[in-house]
Structures are given as C-alpha cells and as structure tokens.
Image (cartoon, rainbow, N blue to C red):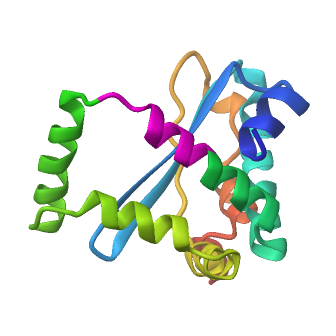
Amino acid sequence: SQGLHKILRIEKNLVYGCWVFYLNVEKEGMLGFATECDKKNINEILKTISEYISNLVANGLDEDTITKIKENSKFTMAATEPKVSTYFNLLSDFKWYNKVMNRKKNREERMATTVEELNKMVKEVFENPTVSATIYGDADKIDVMSKAEFNKLFKTKDNKK
C-alpha cells in the first residue's frame, strides 16, 4: 500500500495488477516485478519502476514504512493456516540451500532488521544491477522502448561502459 503498487495502480492508473517477488540462492538473487497492463502503458511502467528504484537508492526507506511492513507481516503470520505448501517450501529451501532452513529464526531476523540495515542493502542491491525485462501479450516491438533506452533508464552494466 505504500510502494510501487500504490504508484502504478492507484496514483498513475497504469496497471490492473502488479506484484513484487524475489528469489535468492546462496549469494545470488532476483527481484522481479510483474504487471498486467495495456500495451500503451508498458514504457511508462518501466520508467515508473526505474524512478521508484532510483528514489529508494537516493532516499531509502523510512521508519514508518518499515513499521507498517513488519506489522503487516505479524498479521499475516498470525492469520496463516497450516497448509501443504509450507512443507513444499521447506523442501524447496533444502534444494536451494542444501539444508533445512529455520523459518522461525529467519522471521525473527527479518523482524529485527533496522531501517539502516535495509537501506544499506537497497544501495548494495541496486548499485550495479543486471536488469532485464520480459514482455508478453499483444505488444509489438514498436510498443516498447529500445534496449538502449531501457539500459539507460536502469543504468545497467551494459550502459556503464
């Protein structure tokens, strides 16, 4: 409610829906953004995501936002019913990390993370990103900015040469 979804959906009305997801394996990770939109909005969505990330790097997250995220997380944990997917997630953890992860300990560590630690991580993650986009649906090449424009927008490694 505070971040990218608010900007893309509520403020700019560019998407029908959007999601942020992540995957991390050992020392590698991926942060992904998925949206459902009209093809006329693709370039503006890419620009908005780029601006959002740039703003995060420049200004960081604030204490109020982190508090809201942690409170929402507590509610989600308390409201979660036991389900089979939890056990599949443990198996998936074992596949990626070669050990059974202690999800309770991980949750406690996340809840204890400070704003300063998070902002340091944001800078590390986005300082020199490798960025790509996959666009599918009825969009054609003419509907989407060029690779050079995209690289410039996200200041990717290819553009820093």
- In the displayed structure, does residue 94 sit left or right of residue 153? left
Q: Main secondary structure of the magenta part?
A: helix
Considering the image in quadrants, where does the C terminus appear? bottom right
Q: Is residue 132 magenta?
A: no
- In the displayed structure, does residue 31 sit left or right of residue 57? left
Considering the image in quadrants, where does the N terminus appear? top right
Residue 160, image x, y percentages: 65, 80
Count of numbered badges drawn on the protein: 0
Q: Residue furthest front?
A: 78
Can residue 10 be seen here? The reply is yes
Residue 19, image x, y percentages: 57, 36
Q: Is residue 78 magenta?
A: yes
Q: Residue at x 12, y 62 (%)?
A: 100
Q: Residue at x 35, y 71 (%)?
A: 28
Task: Compare residues 112 and 90 and report the one nearer the observer.
Answer: 112
**18 lies above or below 27:** above
Task: Compare residues 146 and 72 and report the one nearer the observer.
Answer: 72
